[in-house]
Amino acid sequence: MKRSINIWIGIDKITIVLFLLLVTIGWFNIYAAVYNEEHKEILDLSQRYGKQFIWIIATLIIAVFVLIIDTRFYFFFGWFIYAGLIFLLCLVLVLGREINGARSWFEFGQVSLQPSEFGKFGTALALAGFLSTRRQDLTKIKVFIIASAIILFPALLIAIQPDLGSTVVFFAFFIVLFREGMSLYVFISGLLMVILFFLSLLINNLYLIITLIAIAFLIAWFATRKWKLCITGLGILILIGGVLYILDYYLIKTFSNEFIILIAIVLAGIAYAYYVFLYNRKAVAVVIIYLFLLGSVFFINSVDYTFNKILKPHQKERVEITLGFKSDPHGTGYNVNQSIISIGSGGFTGKGYLQGTQTKFKFVPAQSTDFIFCTIGEEWGFLGSVTVVGLYLFLLLRLVILAERQRSVFSRVYGYGVISILFIHFFINIGMAIGLVPVIGIPLPFLSYGGSSLWGFTILLFIFLRLDAGRDEYLI
C-alpha cells in the first residue's frame, strides 16, 4: 500500500549535514596533503584536490539520483544489483589493471574505478533481501550458511585480486547477522579467533594452550558447580596426554607438544562424552565449552601455517611491526612511523592549516588516501582530530537510531549493513594511522581521495537515507 509522502521532507537532515561536513573536511585536507606552490588554486584540475572536487560534484548528483528512485527498486532489484557487482568482480580479475600487485581496477582513460567499493552496497542489499524474506531465522544452520555465503562470495573474489584490506571489510557484515539473531556462540567464536590469532603470535603456543585448558575447566566448574565432573575430565585428559607423550618420547619421536595436547583433547572428549551425559542438563554447557576449547586449539595450531604460508612477506612484516616484534622505520614500518610523528607533532591545537612540515615535505606516503588522518592530526592537532572522530561517532550513532526506527526488516538490515561498513573503515583506517592496527590499505570514508570510494560510500549511505525517508511510503 502506498502512502503519499515527500521524501525531501522525510529525509534525515542531520545525516545529510554530517555527510557534507565530512566530505568538505576531506576535500580541504586533500588540498593540504598534496599542496603544490605552483598550483595553488584549489580547483586546479591537474591536481588531486581539483579532481576530488569533480568527484564531489558527481557524488552530489549521484546522491540526488539515489534519493529520487522509488524504494521498491532497491527491494525488488537488490539481487540483480548484487549479481551485477559479482560479475564486475569476476571481470576485473581478467580485464582489470594491476596496481601495487593487485588487479582491482578498471581503467577508462584518466578515470579508474574499483568494483570492490561498489560491492559493499550490493552485498548489503542482497543480505537485506534474503533476511527479510519470510523473516529468516539465523539460528538455523541452513539460513546462517546462505547468509554467510552472500557475504563471503564477493570477499573471496576480492581476496583473489588480491586486496586484503577490502576483503577484511566484508567480515563487518557479520555484525549485521548478530543484530538479526545469529547465535551468540558464533559471534563469540569470531571474536575469539581474532584474539587468539594475535595471542598465538605473542605467546608460546604450548603455554597458550595450557592456559586455555585451565580457563575451560574453571568455566566448566562455574557453569555446573560440580567438582567431580570437572576433575574427572581433567584426569582423563592428563592420563591420555601422558600416555601419548610417553609413546612419542620412546617410540614415535616426531610429534610436537602442541600436537600431542590436541590429540589428547580429541580422544579425551570422546572418552568423556559418555560420562558427561550421565549428568543433568548442565552437562550440555560442558560440551559447548569443550567444543570451544577444541576449536581454539585447532585454530592456534593453524595460525603458524596461515601466518607463514598465506600472508605475503610485507603483510607479515606489518603485523610484526604492529605487535612490536620488529622495528623497520625506514622500510615496511616507514608509513606508520611517519604518520605517528605527524599526528604527534600537531600537539593540542595543530600547526595550522597548510603549515604541516611532515605534509609539505611529503614524509608520509599515501597521505591523501589511506593516511589522510595524519594531515588532520598535524595541522589541526588534538582538537581537530577529536572533532573529526566525534563527527564519525555522531554519524554512526545517528544511523543506529535510524536503523532501529525502520518498519521493515529489509530497511533495518540494510541500515546495519551501512553502519558496519562505515564503522570498520573508520576503526581500521584511524587505527592504521596511529599504529594500533596493521596497515591493510583502506580509505577513511568521505575524507580520503578517490572517486570509487567516495561514490561507493555515498551510494551505500544514501540508499539507506532513501529507505528511511520512505519508511511509511510502502508497507513491505
Image (tube, rainbow, N blue to C red):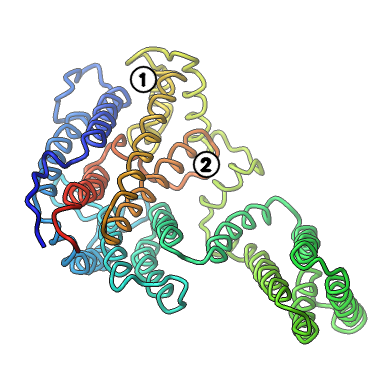
User: Amino acid type of disc 2?
Assistant: Thr
Residue 34, quarter of the rendered image: top left
Left or right: residue 116 versus residue 329 is: left
Which quarter of the rendering shows the N terminus?
bottom left
Which quarter of the rendering shows the C terminus?
bottom left
Name the residue: 48% across, 14% down: 348
Which mark identifies residue 250?
Answer: none
Left or right: residue 108 versus residue 199 is: left
Of 203 and 401, which appears nearest the observer?
401
Give the alpha-carbon distance from disc 2 to disc 1, as whole Å: 22 Å
Left or right: residue 297 versus residue 180 is: right
Residue 288 x %, y %: 66, 72
Which mark identifies residue 360?
Answer: 1
Residue 239 x %, y %: 90, 78
Whether residue 156 is situated above or below residue 37 in the rendered picture:
below
Residue 176 x %, y %: 40, 58
Q: For the residue carrying disc 1, how many other residues have a C-alpha within 10 Å: few (<14), some (14-19), or many (20+)?
A: some
Q: Pointers 2 and 1 in contact (CB under 8 A)? A: no
Residue 88 x %, y %: 22, 64
